[in-house]
């Protein structure tokens, strides 16, 4: 079972999140988006963990600085302000946005066949229209993420009887997906911004954890059996993932 523990005063000036995982073979540090996560096996003492983090402090600070510099050079995929004519990321494309008013109480989003987002805004929505449009698009994309993820699960789960117990769509800033100890799959909805093959790869990856709760050779062989060219999609995520994580 995985346990999440948030530490707020671990070492002077260095705060990290501690996650205990039965899948972890050794203690490791993950640095992403200004956040430090330490993943450790359940039986490793906190004293040993603190000593390990202290020994890696220079590496951590260098990694944080490098990520900050990289973030400053990233070109955001989404517009700074949502209005008529801007483009919105979806499925690896930039889709133009059109607005219309409606007598309905809540905004509604449609993706037209000619690859155009149509957002209906309530007539009374005169303030913070940009925020309303963004929220409507996010909610719509989360629904699409669930539908498309379920299709991929249905497509791939039967082949080797890799049946997850549940699927949860989440907003995450450092992970694309996970498969829990009881085969519950969590999926980051921001994958909907990437080309569809990228979400399919992540779904396959997490489905294979139903059989192998590790990243052993057998695990990667199972991934390759479902998607022989998975390496190029894994590499795409490494190259473009930081932009996706900025979201809408």
Image (tube, helix red, strand yellow):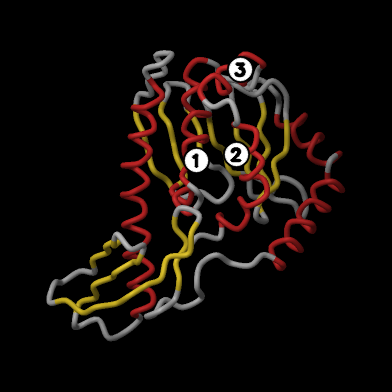
Name the residue beneath numbered marker 2: 233
Image quadrant of residue 97? bottom left
Looking at the image, residue 60 lies above or below residue 140: above
Chain-order first, disc 2 or disc 1: 1
Q: Mark 1 vs mark 3: give the one in front.
A: 1
Looking at the image, residue 167 lies above or below residue 156: below
Asked whether 85 or 115 is in front, the reply is 115
Chain-order first, disc 3 or disc 2: 3
Q: Position of residue 1 (x, y in %)?
A: 50, 23
Answer whether labels 2 and 1 touch (C-beta < 8 Å): yes
Q: Position of residue 9 (x, y in %)?
A: 68, 49
Image quadrant of residue 127? bottom left
CA gap between label 3 and label 2 equals 15 Å
Name the residue beneath numbered marker 3: 221
Disc 3 secondary structure class: helix
Q: Residue at x 84, y 46 (%)?
A: 59
Dot label at residue 197: 1
């Amino acid at each position: 079972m995985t346990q999440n523990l948030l530490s707020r005063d671990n070492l002077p000036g260095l705060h990290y999140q501690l996650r205990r995982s039965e899948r972890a073979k050794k203690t490791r540090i993950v640095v992403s988006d200004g956040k430090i996560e330490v993943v450790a096996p359940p039986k490793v003492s906190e004293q040993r963990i603190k000593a390990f983090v202290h020994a890696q402090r220079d590496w951590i600070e260098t990694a944080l600085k490098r990520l900050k510099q990289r973030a400053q050079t990233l070109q955001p995929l989404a517009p700074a302000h949502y209005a008529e004519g801007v483009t919105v990321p979806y499925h690896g494309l930039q889709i133009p946005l059109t607005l219309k008013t409606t007598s309905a109480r809540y905004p509604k989003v449609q993706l037209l066949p000619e690859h155009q987002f149509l957002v209906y805004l309530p007539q009374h929505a005169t303030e913070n229209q940009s925020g309303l449009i963004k929220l409507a698009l996010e909610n719509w994309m989360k629904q699409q993420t669930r539908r498309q993820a379920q299709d991929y699960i249905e497509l791939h789960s039967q082949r080797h009887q890799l049946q997850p117990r549940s699927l949860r769509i989440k907003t995450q800033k450092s992970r694309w997906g996970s498969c829990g100890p009881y085969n519950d799959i969590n999926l980051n909805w921001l994958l909907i911004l990437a080309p569809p093959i990228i979400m399919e790869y992540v779904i396959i990856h997490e489905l294979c954890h139903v059989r192998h709760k590790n990243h052993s050779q057998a695990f990667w062989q199972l991934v390759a059996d479902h998607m022989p060219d998975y390496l190029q999609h894994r590499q795409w995520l490494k190259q473009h993932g930081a932009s996706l994580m900025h979201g809408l």
